DNA sequence: ATTATTATGGAAAACGTTTTTTTAAATAGT
DNA sequence: ACTATTTAAAAAAACGTTTTCCATAATAAT
């Protein structure tokens, strides 16, 4: 049935001019075109509801106008907000956002890269922290090389071991700041609930936690570091372990809010009072952190804004504005009631 | 600096054959090509890290392999799950998902349609309910017409007033089922917290609520219908209004879980006991619904699965499998403690 | 031994644009 | 009145594929 597409030629015929002229009108090029002709073309375009075929344009210009965004899990509010920010900025400039959900699978991430390469994406954003896996790293190095030969801009959000522009989110800094606060409140027996093992972000956050302890002359006790996976349920499970050592712990620092919320829920459920018996803090400032019981002390990382900043940065770079600097975002400590001063 | 792209011609040269032959190998076409030649081509492809330019392919085949997904808010777990499901299915088949976040703005939705039209998307999924606005409707009708002339498949998730394939999610049915349950538990003075005004989904959900009342011979009292916007905060605000009429209300049906959770939170905060003084139910079964205080009685709509089903349906349709039927999903009543039997 | 068929491959056209080159007409400069 | 310049528009080439059409050599059928 394939209906014939309306092309620039149809417009030209109707406007009684050449396709060349139509193109010039569309792109209001430098080449002069008389007012009458331009008007006839505009009219024809409107009449035919013509919109230029971006694929054909792309072929000519070697631009796809595609920005690929690779996330671990689009259902994670962190990524959802970032994608929203990126999309908000970018779609206003006729770019489109391609999304890839990797579920933290190395294979899927590579698959996404392959698709994006084949589609000649103008830029790729590796929105989640790097996965830690040797073979993967090698393949990624080669892939990134190819992409850069192909003139694709690759951007990483947390530090990656790849030779790309990395936007440093200050994951470690955030953990350091909040742990400092916990210590300032008199706690010295502090548990940590970790993030997923293979994630670089986890590594960084834990690093920030440890840095704060060391800075304050508190020995890092590996027995007080509990497994987690960034999820509510992970937090709950960790809490059950924490309860077993409750006498040697006065505060819990969680690698993110979901974890902290899960831990608090389970502690409450097991009749351990937060913050009277134990303090809990997180990172991210999820919307629900405000309404948990008790409200969660956490750190806000303005991810949506990060997204728009990324979009802006990207567009500047794609338009050869090489000097454009990425606008950093500021993290913010949010004090609520889940952290209590130790007497 | 624009690095020269590696093309089929480079491969041809290295493999000592014509571009035609390379193309045949890539697409393992019907036209026979000898084993040796094929192997030489494969080797050359690997050596050059060649991947065919999808844009050029698209120009020739009039296929972009783009599936556009238009959502109201990607941060809403409902949409995030659906997108994840769609992406999961589709990216395994070399299609790519383009995402558009409209923030429920009519202009942005039309803009998204324009971009998708220009990019010759193979299919567009209108993932959120229609916005209700007369002018918008007209423009959308015309847009959809153009898209269909252009052979783009347009799919709507909740009923839309447009002439497209609509996947009926049973929003009204879900509300009817849960309201029936509330009534079965002895409640007759039931408040409703509505969704956003201009949203067709809101309209449908409210319709289901009303239908249940009428079926059970309970008069619909407009004074017991409160404004909401599908958000936690909206639920909180509505709860403050509900409290003013607390004596004439024994149960609250919310248009979604976020609203229900917000309402419960505020009720608790104002020392109104749920479910002893008032029952609350929602729709969606958000992850946090399980961990709220008290755990929320709600309806599960398996959205992720809906997403994969949509993906499957779409791919079948795009491959001219016109008889493929959409696989319906089943809603499920989740009984928890926020609904209490009235004595 | 001649013709028909099959296997393999290349040349050229096509997809819908943009860009470069060419052409034609009108104006300006002498 | 002739040449130079400017303005406007068209023709042709290009982007990287796929597809249609031809060409050749080898095999099979008579």
Image: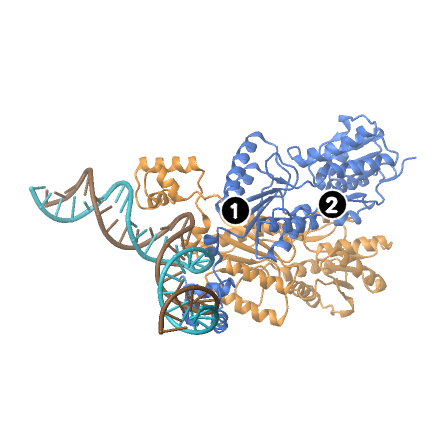
Chain colours: A blue, B orange, C cyan, D brown
Q: Can you tell which mark lies on residue B91?
A: 1
Q: Is residue A258 above or below residue B176?
A: above
In the rendered view, does A134 fall on the left or right side of B64? right
Q: Secondary structure at mark 2?
A: loop
Residue A293, percent from left and from top:
82, 46
In the rendered view, does D20 fall on the left or right side of B341? left
Q: How many marks?
A: 2
Image quadrant holding the C terminus of chain A, namely top right
Same chain for the residues at labels 2 and 1, yes or no?
no
- The chain that hosts pointer 2 is A
Q: Is residue A11 above or below residue B152?
A: below
Mark 2 or mark 1: which is in front?
2
Residue B152, percent from left and from top:
48, 60
Looking at the image, can residue A216 be seen?
yes
The residue to which callout 2 is attached is A301
Looking at the image, can residue B293 be seen?
no
Q: Secondary structure at mark 1?
A: helix
Residue B121, percent from left and from top:
50, 57
Q: Can you tell which mark lies on residue B26?
A: none
Residue A170, percent from left and from top:
72, 39
Q: Nearer the viewer, residue B256 or A129?
A: A129
In the rendered view, does A100 fall on the left or right side of A203? left
């Amino acid at each position: 049935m394939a209906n014939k597409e309306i092309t620039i030629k149809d417009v030209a015929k109707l406007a009684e001019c050449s396709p060349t002229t139509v193109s010039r009108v569309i792109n209001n090029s430098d080449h002069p075109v008389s007012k009458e002709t331009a008007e006839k073309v505009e009219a024809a375009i409107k009449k035919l509801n013509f919109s230029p075929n971006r694929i054909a344009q792309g072929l000519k210009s070697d631009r796809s106008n595609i920005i690929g965004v690779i996330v671990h899990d689009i259902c994670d509010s962190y990524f959802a907000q970032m994608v929203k920010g990126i999309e908000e900025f970018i779609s206003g400039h006729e770019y489109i956002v391609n999304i890839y959900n990797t579920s933290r699978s190395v294979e899927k991430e590579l698959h996404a890269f392959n698709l994006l390469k084949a589609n000649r994406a103008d830029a790729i954003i590796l929105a989640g922290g790097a996965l830690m896996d040797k073979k993967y790293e090698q393949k990624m190095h080669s892939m990134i090389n190819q992409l850069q030969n192909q003139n694709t801009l690759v951007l990483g959000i947390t530090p990656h071991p790849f030779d790309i522009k990395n936007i440093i989110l200050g994951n470690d800094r955030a953990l350091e700041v909040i742990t400092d606060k916990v210590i300032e409140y008199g706690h010295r027996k502090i548990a940590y609930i970790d993030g997923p093992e293979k994630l670089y972000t986890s590594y960084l956050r834990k690093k920030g936690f440890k840095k704060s302890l060391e800075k304050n002359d508190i020995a890092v006790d590996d027995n007080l570091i509990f497994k987690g996976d960034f999820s509510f349920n992970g937090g709950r499970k960790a809490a059950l372990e924490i309860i077993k050592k409750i006498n040697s712990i006065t505060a819990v620092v969680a690698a993110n809010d979901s974890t902290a919320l899960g831990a608090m829920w389970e502690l409450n459920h097991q009749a351990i009072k937060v913050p009277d018996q134990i303090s809990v803090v997180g990172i991210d400032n999820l919307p629900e952190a405000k309404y948990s019981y008790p409200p969660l002390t956490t750190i806000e990382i303005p991810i949506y804004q990060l997204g728009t900043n990324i979009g802006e940065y990207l567009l500047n770079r794609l338009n050869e504005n090489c000097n454009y600097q990425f606008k950093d975002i500021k993290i913010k400590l949010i004090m609520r009631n889940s952290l209590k001063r130790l007497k």
